[in-house]
Image: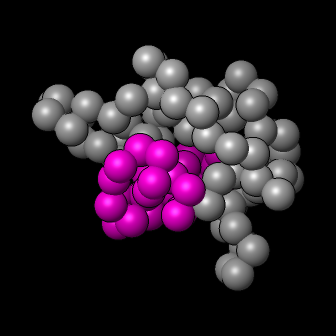
Amino acid sequence: MPSVVSVGPDDLIDHEGPVPPYRQLAAILAARIERGDWQPDRAIPSENQLVGTYGIARTTVRRAVALLVEQGLIYVVPQRGMFVRRR
């Protein structure tokens, strides 16, 4: 079961800022992966959880996920979820 997303002051999306929300979300999730909040081959929160937690659109979450996949930090298993990639 994916871990719950807790939002701290450094994990807030600035909807009015110069950085697009999908890039902000990707940076937040990448930082959590880097500090070990989620272990390799373990699921990260679902799209629905991220949408609800951060108050952003599903397409924004999908763009952030695509960026993290491109960066090699996560991989997606259809019908199963998003998982932290082993280094």
Residue 9 x/y as whole percent: 44, 18
Residue 3 in percent (x, y) is at 75, 45
The residue at the point 68 percent across, 61 percent down is 82
Majority secondary structure of magenta residues: helix
**Residue 36's x, y, as percent?**
77, 28
Give the residue at x 76% y 53%.
2
- State yes or no: residue 73 in magenta: yes
Q: Residue furthest bottom?
A: 79
Residue at figure coordinates x 46%, y 27% from the top left:
11
Q: Is residue 12 visible?
A: yes
Q: Which residues are magenta?
A: 47-74
Task: Give the quadrant of the N terminus.
Answer: bottom right
Compared to 76, does 72 lie above or below? above
Residue 67 visible from this viewpoint: no
Whether residue 57 is in magenta: the answer is: yes
Look at the picture and state if 39 lies above or below 49: above
Structure colour scheme: one colour
**Between 10 and 52, the one nearer to me in the picture:** 52
How many numbered discs? 0
Specify the quadrant that holds the C terminus.
top right
- Looking at the image, residue 6 sits to the left or right of residue 22; the answer is right
Left or right: where 49 falls relative to 59: right
- Residue 4, given in percent of the width and then of the height, sits at 68, 44
Which of the two residues, 65 or 2, is positioned nearer the viewer here?
2
Q: Nearer the viewer, residue 62 or 53?
A: 53
In the picture as drawn, the residue positioned furthest to the top comes out as 9
**For the point 68% across and 34% down, which residue is it?**
33
The quadrant where residue 54 appears: top left
Drawn side of residue 12 relative to residue 47, left or right:
left
10 in relation to 61, above or below:
above
